[in-house]
Image (cartoon, grey):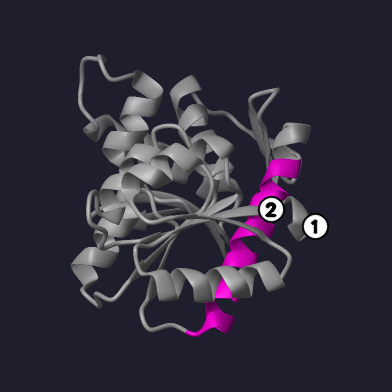
Amino acid sequence: MNRLNETILLVDDEEDIVSFIRDALELDGYQVLTAASGQEALSLCKLEPSLIILDVMMPDMNGFEVCRVLRETMTCPIVFLSASQSEVDRIRGLAAGGDDYLLKPFSMAELKARVHAHLRREQRIRTQKEQGILRFPPLTVDCLGRTVTCRGQEIVLTNKEFMILELLAMHQGQVFTREQIYEKLWGYDAEGDDATITEHVKKIRSKLAAVSEERTYIQTVWGIGYKWEVKS
């Protein structure tokens, strides 16, 4: 991975932490943008960073609020930093659209390892998107042909089922609430409710399990929603 092409947006109002993290990431070859407030972060996101490191506690908008706004237009990984060890806050971070949650104080080695892992995954998915093919052996998702196959056998999905599977698969590891999935696929003004997402997911899982019993792809994140994660 060419880190010179990777830009990280670091959002934190503590100058010492910002300086420490920025210097460490720049030494690793990343370009680093910094913001001391939520509003400044939203403005800098026009530059399309590859990854965002986002503090939870800030003076104007908290990190959860910033994340929710960003997720309306951005899909890049978002890593929360927080001094709170509350499980509720970790759940709030995931529900807002975060990909990771790192507790303060943290080791720089761990932060850099997580940043690298998220960017490596994003680069792999980006390459697959350009080809129109997502591969999760033995499963293959053809986004252009709108087909899903497992060991050469096609899994027949309805249009909405394919759209849900594609959305989750294209954002591997990112948690989506049922409300977010419904709004993205049906639109804000659609009549109905997000309970239909649960039924669609059940049907997708059943069809996947019929041909790929050794792997589960759509994971339930209890109290929040779903994410795509490949587990043996």
Q: Nearer the viewer, residue 112 or 95?
A: 112
Residue 230: mark in rendering: none
The reply to whether dot 2 and dot 1 touch (C-beta < 8 Å) is yes
Give, as a three-letter code, the residue at label 2.
Glu
* Numbered disc 2: secondary structure: loop
Disc 2: CA contacts within 10 A as few (<14), some (14-19) or many (>=20) = some
Which residue: 66% across, 67% down? 26
Which residue: 21% across, 74% down? 86
Q: Is residue 190 above or below residue 68?
A: above
In the picture of the structure, the residue carrying the numbered disc 2 is 6
Span highlighted in magenta in the image: 107-127
State which quarter of the image contains the C terminus.
bottom right
* Spatial separation of the CA atoms under disc 2 and disc 1: 7 Å
Q: Is residue 180 above or below residue 123?
A: above
* Numbered disc 1: secondary structure: loop
Residue 59 picture location, percent across and down: 22, 56
Q: Is residue 222 left or right of residue 47?
A: left
Which residue: 68% across, 61% down? 30
